[in-house]
Image: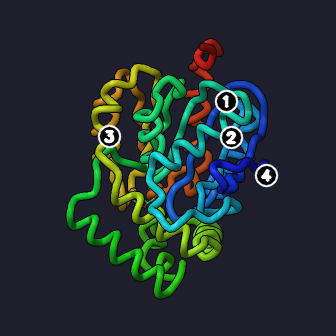
């Protein structure tokens, strides 16, 4: 992986392939490894840039403050700056989708196209914020195991390949409690993003697993309705991490979307 420093924090990222730059933002409580099936297949067609968010994977720990979604977006923009890339197609899974929407709010001119995967435009309601506070406390007490116990069964469907589930469990266990707590607090602070989606004029793809138990298909339909001319793909039998659980179907949808984009999209 390559590395840069952003305001004193190490941000590690994959930069694989050539051609159309596609930035992929991972979900919680995971790392860039959750895009392994895309790194292995899609980097033959496009340039994939996949950071570990601060506090996750090989990136450095966050400070004492919450990792807000705008912070993740600015770190990712700093990665694009370091690579000399002005505009990229930006994709995000779940929390990564929240960060992609935060990027639209930060600087929509950097987003040439959008891929929203198993995510939602809504903010947390009061009950959701209270659940985040409980989750943060549980992680402080018991580490990432608390997230394995609370989330693993919701991240993938019952039909998930046991090897994929085991890999996911190991990935969650490998994350630092400090990074997870900061991100949980950051997710609770995010504003709703219906407005930024309605304003986005570029091409977009919305993907959701049919069995997504965290951000179900109704959330995806809501976003697709707001995005002008977007394409919505529902992946049969897949859960919340459709790109990891059903990589062939996900990659086919992403490849067909990316192949439809003109090369001129990223210039200017
Ligand atoms: C994720 O998959 O990134 C999280 O489940 C998102 C969330 O908790 O809202």
Residue at the location (52% across, 28% down)? 111
Q: Mark 2 and mark 3: span between their CA atoms? A: 24 Å
Q: SS for tag 1?
A: strand
Q: Quadrant of ligand 1?
A: bottom left
Which residue in the protein does label 4 denote? Answer: 1
Q: CA distance from mark 3 to mark 1?
A: 24 Å
Of tags 3 and 1, the one toward the viewer is: 3
- Callout 4 environment at 10 Å: few (<14), some (14 to 19), or many (20+)? few
Is residue 134 visible in the rendered image? The answer is: yes
Residue occupying image coordinates x 50% and y 61%:
28
- Callout 3: helix, strand or loop? loop
Rendering colour mode: rainbow
Give above or below for 215 relative to 117: below
- The local crowd at label 1, few if under 14, some if 14 to 19, many if 20 or more residues have their Cα within 10 Å, is many
Q: For residue 256, which quarter of the picture? A: top right
* Numbered tag placed on residue 21 in the rendering: 1
Relative to the observer, which residue lies in front, 212 or 178? 178
Q: Which residue is mark 2?
A: 49
Percent from the top left, x then y, of residue 208? 42, 46
Residue pushed farthest bottom? Answer: 141
Residue 144 pos. (x, y %): 54, 78
Tag of residue 193: 3
């Amino acid at each position: 992986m390559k590395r840069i420093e952003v305001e004193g924090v190490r941000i590690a990222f994959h930069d694989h392939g050539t051609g159309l730059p596609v930035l992929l933002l991972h979900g919680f409580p995971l790392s860039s490894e959750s895009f392994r099936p895309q790194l292995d297949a899609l980097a033959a067609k496009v340039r994939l840039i996949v950071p570990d968010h601060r506090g996750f994977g090989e990136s450095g720990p966050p400070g004492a403050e919450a990792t807000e979604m705008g912070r993740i977006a600015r770190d990712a923009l700093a990665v694009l700056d370091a690579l000399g890339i002005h505009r990229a197609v930006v994709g995000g899974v779940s929390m990564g989708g929240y960060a992609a929407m935060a990027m639209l709010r930060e600087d929509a001119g950097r987003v040439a196209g959008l891929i929203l995967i198993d995510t939602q435009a809504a903010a947390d309601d009061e009950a959701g914020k209270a659940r985040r506070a409980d989750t943060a406390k549980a992680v402080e007490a018991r580490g990432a195991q608390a997230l394995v116990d609370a989330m693993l069964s919701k991240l993938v469907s019952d039909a998930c390949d046991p090897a994929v589930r085991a890999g996911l469990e190991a990935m969650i266990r490998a994350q630092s409690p400090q990074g997870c707590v900061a991100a949980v607090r950051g997710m609770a602070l995010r504003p709703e993003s219906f407005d930024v989606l309605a304003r986005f004029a570029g091409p977009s793809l919305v993907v959701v697993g049919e069995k997504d138990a965290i951000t179900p298909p109704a959330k995806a339909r809501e976003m697709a309705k707001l995005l002008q001319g977007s394409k919505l793909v529902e992946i049969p039998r897949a859960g919340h991490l459709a790109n990891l659980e059903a990589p062939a179907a996900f990659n086919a949808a992403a490849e067909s979307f990316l192949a439809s984009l003109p090369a001129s999209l990223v210039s200017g």
